[in-house]
Amino acid sequence: MFSKILIANRGEIALRVIRACREMGIRTVCVYSTADRDAAYLQLADEAICIGEGPAADSYLNIPRIIAAGEVSDVDAIHPGYGFLAENAHFAEVCRSCKIEFIGPPVSAMAAIGDKVACKRLARKAKVPTVPGSEGEVDDEDKAIQLCRKIGYPVIIKAAAGGGGRGMRVASNEVSLRAGFRQAQLEAEKAFKNSTVFIEKYIQYGRHVEVQVIADQHGNACHLWERDCTMQRRHQKLVEESPSPVLNQKTREELCASAVRLIKAAGYYNAGTVEYIVDEKNNFYLLEVNARIQVEHPVTEMVTGIDLIREQIRVAAGEKLSFTQKEIKQNGHAIEVRINAEDPARNFAPSPGVIEELRLPGGPGVRWDSHVYAGYRIPPNYDSMIGKLIVHRPTRAEAIATVKRALGEFHISPIKTTIPLQLQIMDNDQFLKGTVDTGFVERVLLAK
């Protein structure tokens, strides 16, 4: 087992990894930017090293500085968290070439599933359903138009590299296809230094369902069931829950089994997420694979009782999974709502600044994952998420009631947050019935 781990990230995921390491008796090193110099979790790490200025390019994305910090502090491994360099195959390769273990999948597996075009080819070989569309990349508008005439509108243009909704455009006709094609290419080039795009049939009124997977270096691979992440705004998740309120058990088992087939075909180990779109008839199709821990991993932890960060570390150290597939059960219902420092009343304008007052929710079944505190200054440099409220109760109805109660207890000022929108979601009849889709928030809730 590792004796010291460097955490190449910030915020709540850095704190989450620190906590897991402390319980395992592993020393931690936190790197931080000047914008995060007042982060309270730095005091919980055994060492803290400043690696640059606030902009991520000067700090959390600066590979030489992170590696130097790891070498100076003599760490055994680096945990990348999510975002930043978590899915950067070059970073993983550099870590291992410097004799520092990267807590994540092998570079070969990252290459196999990191590019969405290559991943779709692999999925077909593994008999995992994929959305009808281009066999590979589409490099010019004329080819795009010919393809779309064949598969029919609407279609979605997607960047082959990256994720997070960037480099994606929906087109309902040739006019919007031409505009969206160029925009997707430009956005993909800017975000990922890769302008490659591909095209798929757009599944209208679909649900976003993903499967948590984990595998070790001894050939063992398991799924930890599914999470439903349908409630989104601009492809950014707002609410995640498990189990999905719409899947029947047969579809659930087929979906999860297909995810295991795919990661085995990729030679994948460590934690990952296989994402799907599910249509109104419960047909499911592969979207992509995220080769890292997800923001919403606590949802899975609550229903399975498995500490995913601990298991990630064990797998990276060469140990076998501590469970078998038959031992993993779904118990109760878990819901996570993301709390962002944004103002829904002003088109989700960022709301950075100092948190002057903070009252947190509690009580049975409530978990709060966050790094913020009263007096904390939210920097403008990074993602606006300030915390995650996770609830675990015996039934979905009870979980929703607890989320509402907990959100009502929450008080934060003077910054604005997405709590009003989350309360609106929890009160919505269609959400309560489970009859929503990925476009529901923008089409219904935000259209009023």
Image (spheres, rainbow, N blue to C red):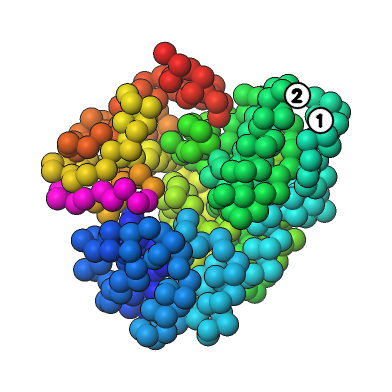
Main secondary structure found in the magenta portion: loop
Q: Is mark 1 on a helix, strand or loop?
A: helix
- The disc at residue 174 is 2
Q: Residue at x 56, y 60 (%)?
A: 87
Q: Which of 348 and 437 is in front in this view?
A: 348
* Real-space Cα separation, disc 1 to disc 2, in angstroms: 7 Å
Vertical arrangement, residue 160 with respect to residue 59, above or below: above
The spot of residue 216 in percent (x, y) is 60, 69
Q: Pick the quarter of the image with the C terminus.
A: top left
Q: Nearer the viewer, residue 15 or 402?
A: 15
Q: Which residue is drawn at 68% across and 25% down?
A: 176
Q: Pick the quarter of the image with the N terminus.
A: bottom left
Q: Which amino acid does label 1 sit on?
A: Ile
Where is residue 56, by image quadrant? bottom left
Part of the protein shown in magenta: 373-382
Vertical arrangement, residue 215 with respect to residue 366, above or below: below
The spot of residue 139 in percent (x, y) is 78, 44
Vertical arrangement, residue 151 with respect to residue 354, above or below: above
Q: Position of 292 compared to 182: left or right?
A: left
Q: Nearer the viewer, residue 87 or 349?
A: 349
Q: What residue type is labelled 2?
A: Glu
The residue labelled by disc 1 is 145
Per the image, is 153 magenta?
no
Q: Position of 275 compared to 408: left or right?
A: right
Discs 1, 2 touching: Cβ within 8 Å: yes
The spot of residue 95 in percent (x, y) is 53, 77
Where is residue 90, by image quadrant? bottom right
